[in-house]
Amino acid sequence: MTFHKMQDMLQARADLLFAGRFEEMARHILFPLPVYLQASPVVISCASHLSLVLGPVREVLISRGVLRCIPTVQAVEITRRGRFRVWARWEERAADPAQSSRTEVVNYFRDTGTGILSEMLEYLDEGQAAALSLTGGQRRIA
């Protein structure tokens, strides 16, 4: 997959987050989904609990005036046995530039032949990870 197509795919998924369309987002995830944060992991065990984790993240972003999260793909790993990683920098663009931020994420994907599913996320810095940690720190969402 080209960088441009990967950026388009990541952008479409971020747009689903901002629209609160968690059921549609779940179609692009292989559960359970581990999300590694700086301090502690969160494991989202099933589609029905995705909104429990991402709902508060969406609320925090909106309350900070973030209008959109924009990905920049930095590297795409060669696919091996249907799996590959994508390194992306996410820019949270807010109406007030002081509320804008960036975060680095490694996205782990699986190409199933019928679509590309997220298998795991690893946040390399605080950025959005701070919002995710509001979901309760180290816990399994089951």
Image (cartoon, rainbow, N blue to C red):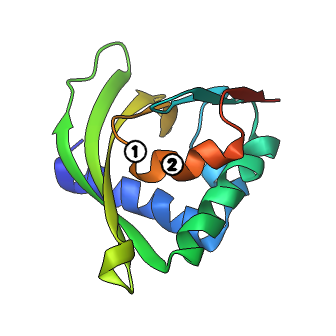
Decide: is 41 above or below 92: above
Left or right? Give the position of 79 relative to 22. left
Q: Residue type at mark 1: give it.
A: Glu
Residue in the image at 60% along x and 43% along y: 133
Q: Is residue 69 visible?
A: yes
Decide: is 58 above or below 109: below
Q: Are marks 1 and 2 in contact (CB under 8 Å)?
A: yes
For disc 2, the neighbor class at 10 Å (few under 14, some 14 to 19, many from 20) is some
> What percent of the width, then of the height, locates residue 8?
32, 60
For disc 1, the neighbor class at 10 Å (few under 14, some 14 to 19, many from 20) is some
> What percent of the width, then of the height, locates residue 113?
45, 31
Decide: is 95 above or below 90: below
What is the secondary structure assignment of the residue under circle 2? helix
Left or right? Give the position of 35 relative to 22. left
> What percent of the width, then of the height, locates residue 67?
45, 79
Depth order, front residue of 35/78? 35
Q: Is residue 27 visible?
A: no
Q: Mark 2 — residue?
A: 130
Depth order, front residue of 51/84? 51
Left or right? Give the position of 95 relative to 114. left
What is the secondary structure assignment of the residue under circle 1? loop
Q: CA distance from mark 1 to mark 2?
A: 6 Å
Q: Residue furthest top?
A: 81
Residue in the image at 74% along x and 53% along y: 51
Q: Residue furthest bottom?
A: 95
Q: Quadrant of residue 135?
A: top right
Q: Quadrant of the C terminus?
A: top right
Depth order, front residue of 27/124? 124
> What percent of the width, then of the height, locates residue 85?
31, 28
Q: Mark 1 — residue?
A: 126
Q: Residue type at mark 2: give it.
A: Ala
Q: Quadrant of the N terminus?
A: top left
